[in-house]
Image (spheres, rainbow, N blue to C red):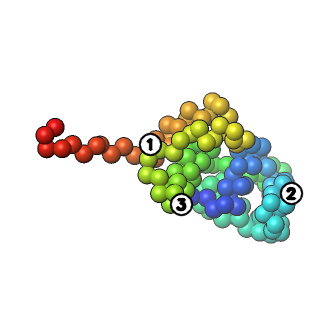
């Protein structure tokens, strides 16, 4: 699966908290952080729809967006990829670093830990000497 870009992740995070939202609602909340115009928000939403990250539902004359990606698997993949690429951590990432997160709650920490362990793969076995 393709990973969301940093701006796409910001959109997903907002949708996970408050979905469904219109393009205007998303833009108004994210524009100060992302520093881009409404047309850029719309284009990003179109790309995210094409990638299967979000879906657009029409309600009357408004289009409302919902996340199709589940929060915990998406965040786990993002964190594990970052740990591998940037810090060269090949094993599971310690979940203690997420204890004060505003994005995940205490009950989601256990799910995140399981997902991170799965993404890291099996731990390498210790090499045994000839006499063992």
Spatial CA distance of label 2 from label 1 is: 37 Å
Of tags 2 and 3, which is closer to the observer? 3
Of tags 2 and 1, which is closer to the observer? 1
Q: Is residue 50 left or right of residue 90?
A: right
Give the secondary structure at mark 2: helix
Residue contact at pointers 3 and 1, CB within 8 angstroms: no
Residue bearing mark 3: 86
Spatial CA distance of label 2 from label 3 is: 32 Å
Q: How crowded is mark 1: few (under 14 residues within 10 Å), some or many (20 or more)?
A: some
Residue 1 vertical placement versus 42 (above, below) = above
Residue bearing mark 1: 118
User: Going 47% across and 57% down the picture, which residue do you hit?
Assistant: 88
User: Going 81% across and 66% down the picture, which residue do you hit?
Assistant: 35
Disc number for residue 28:
2
Q: How crowded is mark 2: few (under 14 residues within 10 Å), some or many (20 or more)?
A: some
Residue 23 vertical placement versus 38 (above, below) = above
Give the secondary structure at mark 3: helix
Q: Which of marks 2 and 3 is nearer the N terminus?
A: 2
Q: Is residue 115 visible?
A: yes
Estimate the x, y position of residue 96 in percent, counting from the top left: 59, 38
């Amino acid at each position: 699966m393709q990973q969301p870009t940093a701006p796409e992740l910001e959109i997903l995070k907002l949708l996970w908290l408050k979905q469904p939202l219109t393009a205007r609602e998303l833009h108004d909340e994210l524009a100060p952080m992302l520093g881009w115009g409404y047309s850029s928000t719309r284009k990003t939403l179109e790309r995210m729809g094409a990638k299967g990250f979000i879906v657009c539902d029409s309600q009357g004359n408004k289009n409302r967006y919902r996340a199709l990606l589940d929060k915990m698997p998406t965040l786990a993949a993002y964190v594990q990829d970052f740990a591998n690429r940037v810090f060269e951590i090949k094993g599971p990432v310690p979940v203690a670093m997420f204890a004060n997160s505003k994005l995940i709650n205490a009950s989601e920490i256990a799910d995140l830990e399981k997902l991170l362990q799965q993404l890291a793969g099996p731990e390498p076995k210790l090499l045994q000497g000839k006499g063992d």
